[in-house]
Amino acid sequence: ALVDELRGTFEWVAGWDKLAPLLTPEALGLPRTARVADVGCGNSTLPLHLGSLYESVLGLDREQHTAETMRTQHGAEHRRVAWGTCDVCDADSLASACPQGLADLVVDKGMLDCAIVEHDAARLLCNVRSWLLSPRGVYVVVSFRKP
């Protein structure tokens, strides 16, 4: 894990330097106008970096305090990025937080790993596919586990 104490951020699995080449619109065959959701974003800087590549990014986390902190610290300087609160493993929470088909790209950096530990992996995968992703959306999982 990568900790930036100055900014108060924490990166699970990998930092932007490793992920950037994999998440560009060109690498994923998506336009810059693709709508992006980062599920389980915590206080990662990933939504900020994604905002430099895509026009609309939503960082989702189940902890309201975390989303509010990121919004307060970064919202004014990163207008393409917003933060929301919901539990992506809970269909009702997800439905109340965002419209169906919101994202053309869902980035999951460590969320599936956590869901596996909490025995919520099936619900996470079903909710991302059935609610969050647009019909031709792309779901990118960055995990500690081997494929």
Image (cartoon, rainbow, N blue to C red):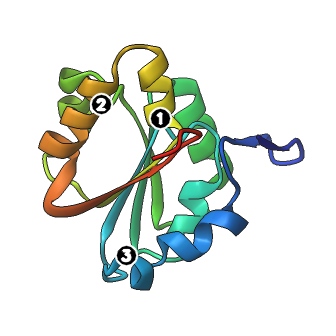
Query: Where is residue 88 shown, x and y percent of the image?
Result: 32, 31
**Snapshot quadrant of residue 54:** bottom left
What is the quadrant of the N terminus in the image? top right
Tag 1, which secondary structure?
helix
- Judged left or right of residue 119, residue 24 is right
> Height in image: 35 above or below 111?
below
The kind of residue on which mark 2 rests is Leu
Q: Residues within 10 Å of mark 1 (few under 14, many from 20)?
A: many
Query: Where is residue 118 shown, x and y percent of the image?
Result: 44, 14
Q: Which residue is more in the foreground, 36 or 66?
A: 36
The residue drawn where x is 15% and y is 53% is 101
- Farthest residue in the top direction? 118
The residue drawn where x is 64% and y is 40% is 43
Residue 21 is at least partly visible in this image: yes
* Residue bearing the label numbered 3: 28
> Height in image: 147 above or below 95?
below
Q: Are marks 2 and 1 in contact (CB under 8 Å)?
A: yes
**Snapshot quadrant of residue 137:** bottom left
Query: Where is residue 50 shown, x and y percent of the image?
Result: 52, 66
* Residue bearing the label numbered 2: 124
Q: Which mark is residue 13?
A: none
Disc 1 or 3, which lies upstream in sequence?
3
The kind of residue on which mark 3 rests is Leu
* Residue bearing the label numbered 1: 111
Q: Are marks 1 and 3 in contact (CB under 8 Å)?
A: no
Disc 3 from disc 2: Cα separation: 22 Å
**Snapshot quadrant of residue 128:** top left
Q: Residues within 10 Å of mark 3 (few under 14, many from 20)?
A: few
Tag 3, which secondary structure?
helix
